[in-house]
Image: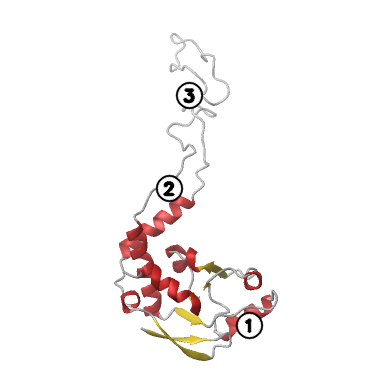
């Protein structure tokens, strides 16, 4: 598949070819779902915690005698049915990570890239840098592409300091190195902009 390449002023400066095995890859929705679930699971901090009846304060004394009071028998005021009592089967700190096969992750990323290409939501731009950090120039770049009101993911070969600082104040824009390209981020943004120099690494990563 041939895709046009534009510069920062949105002028066409050439074309680039992406392998058909990537551009026309079948979209495996279940693999995408599995990968997003895996990504969100491993991001969880897992620091939530509750106390059991053995960990809450107090409750050492039996509140009243076992028999002859006319009330239900109770052993501790920190049993789960009491206000201020322990929690039964409550969450404890844990690690939510679980392994997902690399092949599944690769299929999912290839599916999302193919979907973005087929939708026309993947844009290739000629590599550029800023002489100094300038958010105004970053906004102008997005305006030239007609994306100033869109959520935009920009995939770069590496996080060059001036480019990063120019875009970091824009709430709807995220800069991402090609090595960190992932399914969740590509789905979260309306448009994906790839620097031209990232495409060889993308093809290498997604080739069959």
Q: x and y percent of residue 87 in the render?
A: 47, 31
Considering only vertical position in the picture, is 104 above or below 145? above
Q: x and y percent of residue 113 in the render?
A: 39, 72
Considering only vertical position in the picture, is 145 above or below 54? below
Position of 177 with respect to 31 (left or right) is right
| Circle 1: element type | helix
| Circle 2: element type | loop
Residue in the image at 57% along x and 21% along y = 58
Question: What colour-coding does the image apply?
Answer: secondary structure
Considering only vertical position in the picture, is 52 above or below 149? above
Q: Earlier in the sequence, mark 1 or mark 3?
A: 3
Distance from the alpha carbon under mark 1 to that under mark 3: 63 Å
Q: Which residue is denoted by mark 3 in the rendering?
A: 79
Distance from the alpha carbon under mark 2 to that under mark 1: 41 Å
Q: Earlier in the sequence, mark 2 or mark 1?
A: 2
Give whichever of 77, 141 is nearer the camera: 141
Give whichever of 55, 74 is nearer the camera: 55
Instruction: Tell me, for residue 140, which label it has, or none.
Output: 1
Q: Quadrant of residue 70?
A: top left
Considering only vertical position in the picture, is 109 above or below 130? above
Q: Quadrant of the C terminus?
A: bottom left
Q: Which residue is denoted by mark 2 in the rendering?
A: 97
Q: Mark 1 near mark 3, Cβ–Cβ under 8 Å?
A: no
């Amino acid at each position: 598949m041939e895709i046009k390449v534009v510069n920062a002023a949105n002028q066409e400066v050439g074309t680039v070819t992406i392998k058909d095995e990537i551009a026309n890859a079948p979209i495996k929705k279940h693999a995408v779902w599995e990968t997003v679930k895996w990504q969100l699971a491993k991001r969880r901090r897992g620091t939530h915690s509750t106390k059991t009846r053995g960990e809450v304060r107090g409750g050492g004394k039996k509140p009243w005698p076992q028999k002859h009071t006319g009330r239900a028998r109770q052993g501790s005021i920190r049993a789960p049915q009491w206000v201020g009592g322990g929690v039964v089967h409550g969450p404890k700190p844990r690690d939510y990570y679980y392994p997902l096969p690399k092949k599944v992750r690769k299929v999912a990323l290839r599916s999302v890239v193919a979907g973005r290409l087929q939708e026309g939501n993947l844009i290739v731009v000629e590599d550029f840098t800023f002489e100094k950090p300038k958010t105004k120039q970053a906004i102008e770049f997005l305006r030239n592409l007609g994306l100033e009101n869109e959520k935009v993911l920009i995939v770069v070969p590496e996080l060059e300091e001036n480019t990063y600082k120019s875009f970091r104040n824009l709430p709807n824009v995220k800069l991402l190195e090609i090595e960190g390209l992932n399914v969740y981020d590509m789905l979260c943004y309306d448009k994906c902009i790839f620097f031209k120099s990232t495409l060889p690494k993308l093809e290498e990563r997604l080739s069959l």
